Every structure is written in C-alpha cells, then in structure tokens.
Amino acid sequence: MIKCTKCASPLDADIYNKNQLSPCPNCGVPIRVDAFPALLQNVTPGENGERLILDDDAGCYYHPDKKAVIACESCGRFLCALCDLEMHGRHLCAACLETGTKTKSIKTLETRRTLYDNMALHISIVSLLFWFFSFITAPVVIYLVVRHWRSQSSIMPRTKIRFMAAFLIAGLQIAAWSWGVYALIRLT
Amino acid sequence: MARKKEYKKLPGIKRYSFTRQQLLLGRDHLLSLTTRVFVEEYKRFYFRDIKAIVLRKVESWKITIAVSGFFSALFLGLALLLSGGWTIFFGVMCVPLTGLFIQQLLYGTSSECHLITAVQMEKLPSLYRLRTAKKVIRRLKPLIEEAQGAISAESLQADAIFLPDKGTGGVRSSVGLSEPQKRLRGRWHTAMICLILINALVTSISIDFHNSFFMSLGTLLFFCFLITVIVSLVRQQNSNLFAPLRRLTWVNLGYAIITFVASYFLIIYIMIKHLGFSNQAMQDQWTLMAALSAVSVRNDPVLLSSYLFFIVADLLLGITGFVFILRHRRLNQA
C-alpha cells in the first residue's frame, strides 16, 4: 500500500487516481496519488537453472551442470536461466553486462558523463580572474579542447560553443603571455 | 538532416548552488538528470516499472512569502523612517526581498513529488511547484498507461483488499518513512505554549514598565521558548501528535526566528534614533541594556507598534496551541 510521503501512514485506495488533491487520512495534508497497474503486480522471483538430464543438452558456460536456455547476445556463451540477464529485450551474461557498463557500450546503463566542454570553459573563465595562473591553465584548456573535441558531452544535444569560447580565451591568454615574454626579453 | 532528439525536456528545473536537477522524457523511460558543474548523472525510470506518482502540496512557499514579505515591509518602513545613508542601505536590502516575494507569488504553490517503483521511492526535486508537477504528470500518464495499460480508481479500490504491504510501501524508501509512530503526551509542547503566553504578559507589562528587569526577563523567556520549540520539534518526529499542533510548532520556530531578527533591527533602530550610536552607551552589554531600557515605548510609534505586534502574535500562537494541546489530549484519551 502506498504511504503518505509526510506522515508515512497508509493511504486509502479511494484517493488513488482521483486526478485531484485529497487530504491524507492521518495528517490531513493534500496529496494526489496516480497509481498504475504495476502497483498490483508482485516482483517475480529470479529463476534457478535447470539441471542437465540428457547428454545431448548443452550446459551453461558458467554452471556446466545446468541446462543452457539461451546464448549471450554479445559474446555468444551459452547461459542457464540463472545466468541469463535480460536488459530491455537483450539477453546478456554477467561479464558482458559488466564490460558494457565499464566501456559505456550499453547506453541504458550509463549513469554519468563528464562535461569536458563545461570544464574547459569554467577553467578559462576562472583563469581570467586569477590571470597569473593562466600560463598553466591556458595549455590545460587547449589540451582539454583538443583531446575531448569528439568525446561525448551532455545527454542533451549541445553545440561546441563552450569548447570554442574556451579555446579562444586560452589562445588569447597564450598569445598575451608570449607577447609579454617577448617584450621582457626585448627590454632586457 | 537534423538528428532526432533522444530526449525531450520536461518543465521544471530545481537549482541548488552548484547543482541543477531536471527531468527528460525518453522513448520508453523518464530520465532524471542531475548536473553538478562538470558532471551529469542519470537515473532512468522505465514506464513499465512505475507503480505510482505521489504528489503532495507543501506549505514552504507560504513561509518564504511571509518571511520575505515581513522583511521587505520592515526594510521599506525603516528606509522611509530613517534618512540619509540608512535610507539607501535599507532600500537596497528591500529590493531582493521584494523580488523574492513577487517571484514566490508568481510561481505559486509548492509541492513535493515522489515516483514509486518496485525497488525505490525517488523524490523528483524539479517538480517542486504544484502547477509544473501537474503539467508533467498530465504528460507522463498516457505514456505510462501505454506501457502498462490503464487502471481505474474503482478497480483499484476493489483490489485494495489484496494490496500487499510489500514492494511499494514496504520498501524502506530514501525518505525513510516506515518507522513506527511513538505516543506523545506533549509536555514540551505545553511548556512551549505556556512560555509564549507568559512572554505575551511580560511584553505587555514592559510597555509601561520598560526597565532592565523586564528586558532581561523577556530575553530569558525568549531563549527558554526557543529551547522548548527545538526539543518539541525533535520529539514530535514520528509521533502520534495532533497534526495541526505539529505544524504549529514549526510556525513557532519561524516566529522565533522572525522575533530574533526583528529584535536585532529594533535595537539598531533605537540606537540610531534615541542613542545616536554613542560610545558611552555601547561600553558593554549591561550599559547598552540600561540605555535601551531607558527608552519609553509609549512615546515611540515604531516601538509601540512592534510591541503590540509581538503581543498579538504571542497570544494568537499561545491560545491556538492551547486549544490544539487540549484536542490532542482528548484524542489520545479516546
């Protein structure tokens, strides 16, 4: 049963799917519950692999005494019901799932991305305030821009404007430093 | 040819100092996107796994409106009363608070939205305004129903008998809600209400007898009141306390903070208007208090009106709390 998100008391089913706020029976706070059929379904327990009975049956790669029911769609290894991991219609083994997570080849398992364009732009802007450190930060920014120009950025499509701005600022800073050093050499 | 967008932005963005939270709509799932300066973090909620969306109205916007409104009025008043640099100072202080006040009024009622799946109960921070949350739910509902099928309120009521206390509610959620309630007699709440009523009495006496004794007594009562409010707030967690009394304790905390800040500004006001920031008056705390208590409340309209405001607020909160305490005791006995 769904509980009130404030007082934790169970909410009566008669306030579900009313499309309007109704008072919680315990604390009286206006609450709206939109329930879906998944609420009435129990979580299905995982299956155990079936033992091999016939010699003709193929065994699981990880559990040779268990009957293989499917092949991994990534590496082709035979898997028993226990080892078969279904990911949005794809059947994978645990090793491929782990590799997919690490290499980010399974997009639906991706949980974070580093925004190098934001990083480059922030560093270049901050270095405008602490200009003396720009002789270090400017090459770092140039490296970030060149190295990660083609790297994946935000999950929402965005332009390369941040990279361009960071590159421009860093380029100008390097030019300014070069001119300063040149002027100093000329002076001495 | 333009690339087809994988995600569509949904209304509502919650901004913290270095973090931004928003919802994106995918083909078969909802994506909660959290951006922390250089990093984006994703949480996916597949339409076929969503069990329920719980939307709750919260009153935090009213508190923001009350506090920002009170202080913008106070600063505006001080800016109009005083002259020279003080007018500019209080005028500048008034501007952002007035902006906040107007913004809160325009954005409207605040809310808290939770999404429930078989294994989690996730708060959706970007849906912190009722209007936006309703808009997003209106957009999500058909998509979830397309993935799972629709369920009517009637059939849910019919099935409610066998709704198990597992999965949804049984899962210890991120908001930690499933602890058993403890029975509370409300002695600290009673003490808090008694103190606020005594404070009203002392404040009304000190209008005519404005001296060091009553000022010290008032300060002592205020700090005792603040302690009882904090203890009451701690004790009322997961208790069976009468809900309006619980809310009143939070109101008392807000009132205590307002009183504290307002008293501070009143002292500044007295120092500017009556003592002229003289060094002699500010030698130490006792000398300052003696100088402050020498000021006649009746002869100063600002002081008199603020004292009257405190008396009325004290009485209002005290009497309401007293009624709530009685109702809580009656309910407890029943």
Image: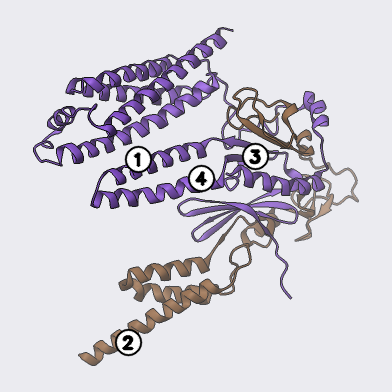
**Label 3–label 4 contact, CB within 8 A:** no
Secondary structure of the residue carrying numbered label 4: helix
Residue at 44% from the left image edge and 66% from the top image edge: A122
Q: Is residue B270 left or right of residue B253?
A: left
C-alpha gap between disc 1 and disc 2: 56 Å
Q: Quadrant of the C terminus of chain A?
A: bottom left
Same-subunit check for callouts 2 and 4 = no
**Tag 3, which chain?**
B
Residue A32 x/y as whole percent = 68, 35
- Report which residue position mark 1 lands on: B74
Same-subunit check for callouts 1 and 2 = no
Asked if residue B23 can be seen in this view, the reply is no
**Residue mark closest to the camera, 4 vs 1:** 1
Same-subunit check for callouts 3 and 1 = yes
Chain letter corresponding to the colour brown: A
Instruction: Determine the image quadrant of residue A4.
Output: top right
Residue at 31% from the left image edge and 45% from the top image edge: B80
C-alpha gap between disc 4 and disc 1: 18 Å
- Report which residue position mark 4 lands on: B104
The three-letter code of the residue at mark 4 reads Gln
The three-letter code of the residue at mark 3 reads Gln
- Report which residue position mark 2 lands on: A179
Residue B101 x/y as whole percent = 46, 45
- How many marks the image carries: the answer is 4
C-alpha gap between disc 3 and disc 4: 31 Å
Q: Is residue B112 above or below residue A9?
A: below
Color style of the picture: by chain
Instruction: Determine the image quadrant of residue B68.
Output: top left
From the image, state the color of chain B.
purple
Badge 4: how crowded within 10 Å, few (<14), some, or many (20+)?
some
Q: Is residue B283 left or right of residue A134?
A: left
Q: Quadrant of the N terminus of chain A?
A: top right
